Amino acid sequence: MLAQLAPKVGEDLVAILQLDLEIARRQDLDHAALEFYVFFSTHRGAREVTRLSPSGQIGKTVKVRLDCFAATVAPPPLFHSPLAPPLQAGPGEASAYIEDLDDLTAGNAVRLLRNGAEAFPAWLDAIDAARTRVSMEMYIFDDDRIGRRFADALCCAARRGVSVRLLYDFIGCRHASPEFFANMRRAGVYTVAYHPYRLWRPRFWTLIRRNHRKTLVCDGQVAFVGGINVADAWLPATDGGGGWHDVAVEVRGPAVQVIEQTFLRTWNWRARRRFRFKRSRVHRPAPAGDVALAAIANRELVDRFSIRRAALHAIRASRERTYLVSPYFMPDIGFINGLARAVARGVDVRVLVPVASDSLLADLTSRASFARLLKAGIRLFQHNPVAHSKALLVDREFVSIGSYNFDHRSLVYNLELVVNALDRDCNEALAATLVEDMAAGTEIRWEEFCRRPLLTRILERLAYGLRHWL
């Protein structure tokens, strides 16, 4: 019996080791500790993997497990040119942009919300219409004009019997007074501060680990995900706000259940027992449209690379265009290489960043990678006022919107969530928004970029050395 099993076991083991080699090679991370981490974080649970023949052709699919870790990678050939295009699904198969088809939830309706001018009224209307529960997760919830409007809406909902839960980040809400949240608690709003920092009990872990998500779910029927915080900076400049440019997405349909359960996983971990809400009590809404989407979230200790992998997978499948916007764009080497390979395939790759964000150090670090991007043929645009959107669109079908910054902090430390949707209408709406911002901004040219002062270059290199802590 053992003699009969030995060839089969050896054959599967070779496939697993080859796949592990592929993971290490394709990630191209610029930090040895992260390469070690990605090996373990991507090998969880039994998965179906596609075995590759020595010639690089796709072979049969097998299900493998090595103790508690299973190998999982996309199916490009093991030995191929770094600039070779990945294997893609046939024309018109939008699912080619999704890394794990098990993450897809069908039957949804999505709507793009541009800036606070569109997002805030939609959020307030949803809170006012809530009848059973409101689940809100916010990185910044300021005690300012728009913040007080949301506080009043949450308090009114609690007074009419709605179960209101607010999970806010302690560091992100550092400018809001403790009394601001105490008033909401007295009105019946359940509030929890994520990782509060106490001087008499200092813990560096709680200081650097932040909840960067921005989500709102009402009655388990409608959800909002994006990069917009509750603060006057996102109000239009005509209303006395900062006029920051940002996007969010409104989701209706079965995927709302996934988004709310993601919120409750963090809430139940941090809230007192009597304030918890079992995730099993969240029912799946009826279909509301024909959009398939995947709500991808990382967690404190696992799935740290899930959002990055999903984005890279979509970029590797691109054939026509890839537009990306991020306020703190500090990509690792592997992500830059993914964009460069797309350019080599003839894809129109553009990146939109702000002229100046709210962090000078982050701006310097971001510009330190511009030379490598420009040399690869990637077009860079700067926009003023602040372009705070965190979005990615690929070709005409794929769009990703959420809280994820393409930087080391989102990759390793922060809790993040994105919605990856296969929807042409949302894709075109986001493309029109980004093209408009690019046209209103300025494109960074290689000749002009090379003429920046020597002192600026030195500061950029020094800041880049701190990228793992920003």
Image (tube, rainbow, N blue to C red):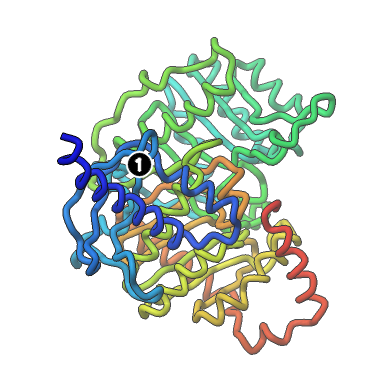
**Image point 45% across, 57% down: which residue?**
24
Q: Is residue 181 left or right of residue 115?
A: right
In the image, residue 276 sits, relative to residue 295, either above or below, namely above
Residue 50 % position (x, y): 24, 53
Where's the N terminus, which quadrant?
top left
Numbered-mark total: 1
Q: Hey, which quadrant is residue 80 in on the image?
A: bottom left
Residue, far top:
274
Q: Is residue 466 left or right of residue 10?
A: right
Does residue 122 appear in the picture of this structure? no
Say which element carries label 1: loop
Does residue 459 appear in the picture of this structure? yes
Residue beneath disc 1: 70
In the image, residue 142 sits, relative to residue 372, either above or below, namely above
**Image point 58% across, 49% down: which residue?**
410
Residue 85 % position (x, y): 32, 72
**Image point 29% across, 53% down: which residue?**
15
- Amino acid type for the residue under numbered disc 1: Ala
In the image, residue 145 sits, relative to residue 130, either above or below, namely below
In the image, residue 71 sits, relative to residue 154, either above or below, namely below
**Image point 49% across, 81% down: which residue?**
377
